[in-house]
Every structure is written in C-alpha cells, then in structure tokens.
Image: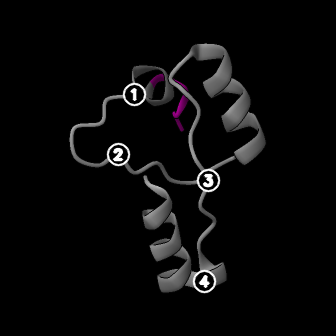
C-alpha cells in the first residue's frame, strides 16, 4: 500500500481499522510480526503471494 492508500484507510475507517505495513516475507520477520500484531484475519489482494506469512497464519 502506498502512503496515499494509507491516508485513504484513515479517512474511510478512522480508528475502526488498524493499518500497518507488513514485513518482507522472511520467516523470522513474519514470525515476529505475527507474534506482536496477533491479527485475527489476513486478507491478500490481487497477485500478492506471501508463502511465509500464509504458512505462519493458521488456526
């Protein structure tokens, strides 16, 4: 997402959505990110393929 996209998220959703940039798809970075962020949902859009984050996001 671009800085403009970030602004659009803030303008559209305000405090109801927490936006952050995901790390590069390195296993150690993804693991740390998920441990800290503890997301409940992962949404991948367009042609984004993130094998490590998909692997680490499991129920």
Q: Which of the two marks, 3 or 2, is nearer to us in this view?
A: 3
Q: CA distance from mark 2 to mark 4?
A: 21 Å
Q: At 62% from the left edge and 50% from the top edge, which residue is drawn?
A: 39
Q: Quick one: SS at disc 3?
A: loop
> Which residue in the rendered view is the most extreme toward the top?
27
The C terminus - image quarter = top right
**Labels 1 and 2 touching (C-beta < 8 A):** yes
Q: Quick one: SS at disc 4?
A: helix
Q: CA distance from mark 3 to mark 1?
A: 16 Å
Q: Which of the two marks, 2 or 4, is nearer to us in this view?
A: 4
Give coordinates of residue 31: x percent, y percent.
Answer: 67, 25
Q: Which of the two marks, 1 or 4, is nearer to us in this view?
A: 4
**Labels 3 and 4 touching (C-beta < 8 A):** no
Label whose residue precedes the other's in the sequence (3 or 1): 3
Q: Which of the two marks, 3 or 1, is nearer to us in this view?
A: 3
Label whose residue precedes the other's in the sequence (1 or 2): 2
Give, as a single range, the part of the protein colored magenta: 55-59
Q: Residues within 10 Å of mark 4 (few under 14, many from 20)?
A: few
Q: Is residue 29 left or right of residue 8?
A: right
Main SS, magenta region, reads loop
The residue under label 1 is 50
The residue under label 2 is 44
Q: At 59% from the left edge and 61% from the top edge, which residue is drawn?
A: 19
Label whose residue precedes the other's in the sequence (3 or 2): 3
Label whose residue precedes the other's in the sequence (3 or 4): 4
Using the rendered view, name the quadrant where residue 48 is placed.
Answer: top left
Q: Residues within 10 Å of mark 2 (few under 14, many from 20)?
A: few
The residue under label 4 is 14
Q: CA distance from mark 3 to mark 4?
A: 13 Å
Give coordinates of residue 22: x percent, y percent.
Answer: 56, 40
């Amino acid at each position: 997402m671009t800085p403009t996209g970030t602004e659009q998220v803030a303008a559209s959703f305000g405090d109801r959505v927490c936006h952050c940039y995901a790390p590069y798809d390195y296993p150690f970075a993804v693991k740390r990110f998920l441990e800290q962020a503890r997301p409940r949902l992962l949404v991948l859009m367009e042609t984004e393929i993130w094998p490590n984050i998909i692997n680490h996001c499991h129920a």
